[in-house]
Image (tube, coloured by chain):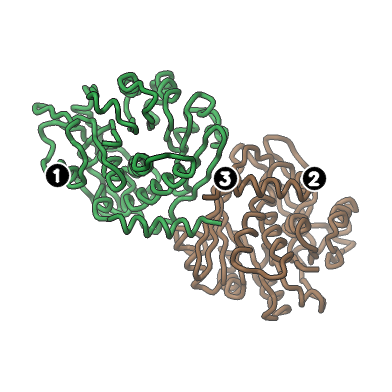
Chain colours: A brown, B green
Amino acid sequence: MKLLIIGSVAMDSVKTPFGKNPNALGGSASYAAVSASYFTSAKIISVIGGDFPARHIKIFKNKHIDTSGIEVLKNKRTFKWSGEYGWDMNSVNTISTHLNVLADFNPMLSGDDKKCRFIFLANNDPDIQLDVIKQVSSSNNFIAADTIEYWIKNKKKKLLRVLKQTDIFIINEKEARLLTSEANLIKAAKRIIAWGAKKVIIKKGEHGLLYMTKNRLFLCPAYPQETVYDPTGAGDTFAGAFLGYLASLKRVNERAYIKALIYGTIMASYNVEGFGLDKLLKIDKSLIQKRYREFTRSVRF
Amino acid sequence: MKLLIIGSVAMDSVKTPFGKNPNALGGSASYAAVSASYFTSAKIISVIGGDFPARHIKIFKNKHIDTSGIEVLKNKRTFKWSGEYGWDMNSVNTISTHLNVLADFNPMLSGDDKKCRFIFLANNDPDIQLDVIKQVSSSNNFIAADTIEYWIKNKKKKLLRVLKQTDIFIINEKEARLLTSEANLIKAAKRIIAWGAKKVIIKKGEHGLLYMTKNRLFLCPAYPQETVYDPTGAGDTFAGAFLGYLASLKRVNERAYIKALIYGTIMASYNVEGFGLDKLLKIDKSLIQKRYREFTRSVRF
């Protein structure tokens, strides 16, 4: 396995103006792993309850995703999230969040897991993220981390310790502003680099993204999306493809990061065109390449 | 003269959180002409009152801008605009607008004016824009037009007739949505092309721009701006540089449009770094080239 994803596996119930999708496969690790599976072999570290449907596990198996790190707590229930989007798909109204098994999530990595080159710490309690970082603690690992507003507000100090130890920190523009108290995203990115993250990606949704290292700034427009059915999981889909593409390479140079950003953009663009993981599960490599070429044509000088 | 600019010359009083700038040189034609002057020879067609300060005319002369098309109505007052920006510089609070001489603006083009290859119809009453189009009416002219919300709301039919006859229609995202009733900017751009504009630029402020022709879509991020002192005139500065660069070329191909978009972006980025025209008047060609190289490095794949 080349990409280890530590995050949630959930049952999502999403409603949008176009319909609803109850108890669908969701969770940060699910989106990231399915997205990554088009580029590399991925393994999920997560926890589910006895109520988790076999058909969801089958989805992972069909994509050759290693599920041996998904602990099953038979007498407990799976993490469940329910949300609703209005016509403005930039923000979601969370109807309910039942952590269930996730409340006791305590990821233990195997010897092989620890040696995995690429590690994605999807959104999680910074204490758990720090614990995983401690377990791997090899300079050979490339660690990417994501977070959400809740942790910025409630565990900022711990989160900054995570950030300091990540090779790439991935957040959205709202989170970046909140974390750094900088309205200007260039200044926010510089602050994050100054705090110790080697690289940072600030996702701006329909306005693309900003990628910064100590020596470089790269601005990437979003895919010119005409239809958005359900934006759930777009960020994790982006991260999964970004890391999955990098993990598929023998050598990673600066050019590879740019290509990875574009693959992330492309996969996220497919993801939002269907409910939950529906569209992401239907595409193939040739469709990905087609959109990759189309997109690079529209942004290349 | 290679670029003819038909628009307003004003006295602007602007207040931002960083200070104020009363009775400064303003107006769409002023910004566009000063910006264009770094690339080509420009001429302004406009009207001013007897109160217009000689020092403002001197600014044009210093930039070798042809002012012979600026009519002076000695007994009347110049167009005056006053506005205030808060910390969110994306929207302005207009304090007052005194059209004065502009209420009777009735541009008459000379024989030479009519032969000018590049013509910029800055924001104006669509009836006036149509009248100018009628005066030039040569297939050798390249006509660019801009507008504002007011005309979309009050003279949409006439505006659509302008649009139909323009080689490039330049508007911002809010105006594009209002004009086309499409929330999605790709769909809005397609609609504008379907209505007859040969090319369209939709400006997204800090999120860059979208350029579309029948056969092409190009997405350009904004310059990664860290400081904004006063965004007044950014759109006209963009248009002036875009057209000024094109007018400076012997032959205009598709690649030239992309370069022109970037020069427009760069000039607008300088413009917002000072009050009114202050910064734009202080830069030189080497600074423009420096930022052009810097920007293309940060967006090139």
Q: In terms of secondary structure, where does tag 2 sit? A: helix
Label 2 environment density (alpha carbons within 10 Å; few <14, some 14–19, many ≥20): few
Q: CB of mark 1 within 8 Å of CB of mark 2?
A: no
Tag shown at residue A282: 2
Viewer-nearest of discs 1 and 2: 1
Q: Is residue B282 left or right of residue A163?
A: left
Viewer-nearest of discs 3 and 2: 3
Q: What chain does mark 3 sit on?
A: A
Q: In terms of secondary structure, where does tag 3 sit? A: helix
Residues beneath discs 1 and 2 located on the same chain: no
Residue A165 in the image: x percent, y percent?
61, 75
Tag shown at residue B58: 1
- Residue pointed to by mark 3: A298
Viewer-closest of B16 and B107: B107
Query: In which quadrant is the C terminus of chain B drawn?
Result: bottom right
**Residue B291, placed above or below residue A18:** below
- Identify the residue at horizontal 31%, vertical 42% (top origin): B233
